[in-house]
Amino acid sequence: MYHFRVKLIILFLLLGALTSCSTTTKSDDPDITGIEKTSDSKQGVSKNADNRLDGTLKTQEQDAKNDIIKVVDPMRDIQINSEIKSTYKQVAKLNKLKQYLQAIKLLDGIQVKYPQLSGPDYQRARIYFGQNKFDLALKSVDSSLNNNSRNYYSLNLKGIILREQGKFEEAREIYFMAIETYPAYPNSHLNLGVLADIYLRDLPLALLQYREYMKLTSNQDKKVANWVLELERRIKAGG
């Protein structure tokens, strides 16, 4: 009931009220979906999936309207100075060059100087994730969240890491936390959609999240637009 309620609140929140927000941390966005979606025959949904989706939206509509709240970017007030920005850019370059030890060393220096920040551990988690060191990535992202539990970039990344570890239910919970923290962040919706589509076989949830992602990105992603059409056809056909 809680997740349905969260999803419905998100639907109404984003119908027209949201605008894209800029923060000093937008350059830290991982922009990681972590997988190329496939459309093979392994994906499935029950024959009643379309009824479940429509019924849920209708029966919970009034509750969702009553629970609409003003959405504020929880990262908007975080200040990152020129030194930190420059370090993050260097880390990104080193990461691309696979010079991981040097990148980690730079992050360690920033972490010591600015221990209150969640960004260095988040960046460190991205580096470990890129090396498929998922346990270390999870440890780092948890450290990031210990400094700032509302860092939705870190929440989104944690969901991706858990998914790669095969912890699909845990990943779903984390994605919902990311969405609840800041519904206007597109990647959390996209990654939850991929998880629901491919791993959880929950096509109604996947469709809902893909649609939210498309709204937040002004319907610019043609690939995801095709996924939406595909899921609509499958749900209508009963899976």
Image (cartoon, grey):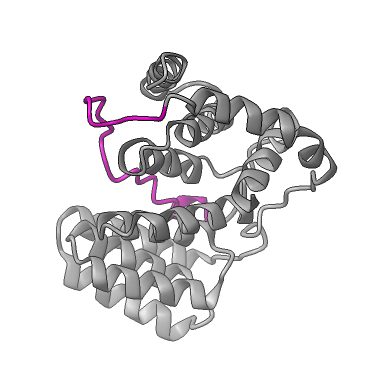
**Number of numbered callouts drawn:** 0
Q: Is residue 55 visible?
A: yes
State the residue at coordinates (80%, 46%).
67
Q: Pick whichever, 154 or 75, lies toward us.
A: 154
Image spot of residue 156 (x, y percent): 45, 54
- Would you identify the image quadrant in which residue 148 lies? bottom right
The front one of 226 and 7 is 7
Apparent side of residue 112 relative to residue 147 in the rendered image (left or right): left
Query: Which image quarter is the C terminus in?
Result: top left
* Residue 237 on image: x %, y %: 41, 14
In the rendered structure, the answer to whether residue 184 lies left or right of residue 223 reads: right
Residue at the image point whose x is 53% and y is 77% from the top: 147
Is residue 215 visible to the viewer in this orientation of the structure? no
| 110 sits to left or right of 131 | right
Compare residues 103 and 9 and report the one nearer the observer.
9
The residue stretch that appears in magenta = 25-46
Magenta-drawn stretch contains 167:
no
Q: Quick check: is 40 in the magenta stretch?
A: yes
Counting from the top left corner in percent of width and height, residue 187 is at: 46, 43
Please report the residue visible at 48 percent of the width from the left and 46 percent of the height from the top: 188
Identify the residue at the far left of this view.
98
Q: Main secondary structure of the magenta part?
A: loop
- In the rendered image of this protein, does residue 198 appear above or below residue 67? above
Q: Looking at the picture, how far across and down is residue 75, in whole percent?
A: 61, 59
In the rendered view, tell whether residue 72 sits above or below residue 121. Answer: above
In this view, which residue lies farthest toward the front? Answer: 47
